[in-house]
Image (spheres, helix red, strand yellow):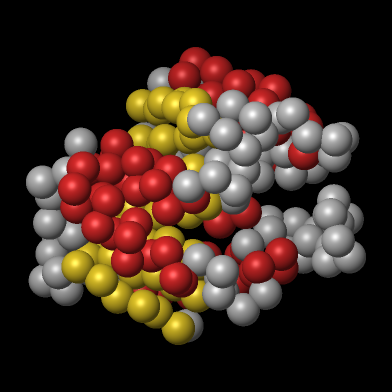
Amino acid sequence: MEIHEYGNPKSDIVLVQPVGDHDLPGIEAEVDEIQRRTNKDFHFWAVKVDEWNCDLSPWQAPAVFGNDDFGNGAGKTLTGILKLCQEEDKAYYLGGYSLAALFSLWAAYQTDRFAGIAAASPSIWFPGFVGYMKSQAVQCSNIYMSLGDKEEKTRNAVMAKVGDCIRDGYEWLKEDGTNCTLEWNKGGHFQEPELRTARAFAWLLK
């Protein structure tokens, strides 16, 4: 796996974020914003995925925009990330934006390795995902979720469900006793992704 590292390599806090090529130009600004918002020392890993729609999808689903269907590569991606997160004396946090945030939420049901999940504007509209959340036991006790207040106002019928899905998922996690929050940001899906993801990680570190 290709990893871009930031922060203090000796820190006992490690933030792990799956990223695509489109994310990399903004990662330094995101790391700076996390540092600005928290006094915690941390090591940050931006783990690059090659095929965004495949490598981060928990199961296959038809394309909702463009021609790229969603694959089922999340299991392989998570296996690779878990191999990196082996040191017992370190606290690992997993998070991301959009489909990487959905992947992080899904990972919370696969392993108890992560101390917290940072899901900024997750693609929680993904077919069958909220039903999956309700049918499985979450293994992470701290979860942050956020959404832009205009994200559900889209003409795409599948993606327009994102608001109802995230409210439903959040209420379910709360009832289940998970320490979680749902923050609403101004704007649509493509507005300030680095800032939104930084807020997510910073909430977990506090």
Where's residue 133, x and y in %? 62, 35
In the picture as drawn, the residue positioned furthest to the bottom comes out as: 2
Image height of 137 relative to 13, above or below = above
Considering only vertical position in the picture, is 151 above or below 23?
above
Residue 191 image point, x, y percent: 54, 45
Residue 86 quadrant: bottom left
Q: How many marks?
A: 0
Q: Nearer the viewer, residue 35 or 63?
A: 35
Question: Quadrant where the C terminus lies?
Answer: top left
* Residue 145 vertical placement versus 117 (above, below): above
Identify which residue is drawn at 85% across, 51% down: 64
Depth order, front residue of 63/27? 27
Q: Is residue 125 left or right of residue 110?
A: right
On the picture, is 95 further left or further right than 161? Answer: left
Question: Relative to 158, is 44 on the left or the right?
Answer: left
The answer to whether any part of residue 84 appears in the image is yes
Please say whether residue 79 is visible from this viewpoint. no
Q: Residue at x 36, y 36 (%)?
A: 142
Q: Residue at x 68, y 56 (%)?
A: 58
How far from the left and from the top, in percent, is residue 171?
55, 18
Q: Position of residue 163 (x, y in %)?
A: 67, 26
User: Toward which corner of the image does residue 12 lie, by quadrant?
Assistant: bottom left
Quadrant position of residue 200: top left
Eyeballing the image, is 114 above or below 155? below
Q: Residue at x 62, y 38 (%)?
A: 188
Nearest the camera: 198 or 133?
A: 198
